[in-house]
Image (spheres, grey):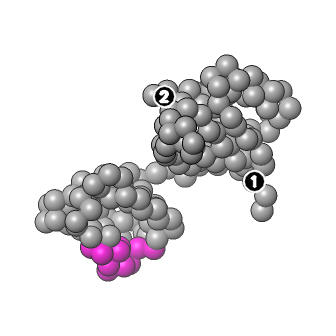
Amino acid sequence: MQLAITALGNNKINFIAELLPAIRDCKCNIVEIRASRLAQSTATYLLVQGNWNQIAKLESTLDVIQRRIDIKIQTLRPESRDKGKDCMPYLLETLSLNHDSIVESVSSFLIDRDIDIEDITGSCYPAPYIQNPVFASKFIILIPPQLHLLSLREEFMEFCDQLNIDAILEPIKR
């Protein structure tokens, strides 16, 4: 059984030092972990596994930690999924002048074509020489086998041209 955990707290609180021992003490194993600083906050995402009793114990322990150190913790027991096992993993990178709907537009393009988004990262920074804000994003996506890759690539490049986005779409090399 698995449990997805998201935790958000102030940078001054080192709550990861609270979460990791709690996971160990409940005899759960970390499958995946990510942590990022976002402005004055830290966000942590974990996927842990254990038997149903260990997961239940961890959920109640997380409630105690959340109240004790004043952080926000959300949990979800994800269902197992077979979707994506026949898909081709691709890396999609974009670069454009920053405007509000870049990530939304690219995500909508992908979702409308039943392409799973596995991971998104992005950030805004001042462009060298011109100092205009530029937004760079990186998507890990799973392209289903029924999509014709050449047609998808052409359609995506047309889409990017309309929004003035520079993009790279390439298979992930293992």
* Residue found 36% across the figure and 79% down from its top: 24
Residue at the (13%, 66%) spot, across then down: 68
Pointer 1 residue: 172
Task: Tell me if mark 2 has few (under 14), some (14-19) or many (20+) residues whose alpha carbon lies within 10 angstroms of its own.
Answer: few
> Residue 3: x percent and y percent?
41, 59
How far apart are the alpha carbons under marks 2 and 1? Answer: 28 Å
Along the viewing direction, whichever of 154 and 61 lies nearer the viewer: 154
Disc on the earlier residue, 2 or 1: 2
Residue in front for this viewpoint, 64 or 27: 64
From where the camera sits, is residue 73 visible?
Answer: no
Q: Position of residue 171 (x, y in %)?
A: 78, 49
The magenta segment: 17-29
Residue 4 point in image, percent of width and height = 42, 56
Q: Label 2, secondary structure: give it.
A: loop
Between 124 and 41, which is closer to the camera in this rendering? 124
13 above or below 124? Answer: below
Question: Residue at horizontal 41%, vertical 53%?
Answer: 77
Residue 9 lies, with reference to residue 115, above or below; the image says below
Q: Verify whether residue 22 appears in magenta.
A: yes
Picture residue at 42% right of the left edge, 69% below the top = 51
Q: Amino acid at mark 1?
A: Ile
Please state if 146 lies on the left or on the right of 129 as rendered.
right
- Image disc number at residue 99: 2
Q: Is residue 163 visible?
A: yes
Q: Secondary structure at mark 1?
A: loop
Q: Amino acid at mark 2?
A: His
- Residue lying at the far left of the rendered structure: 68
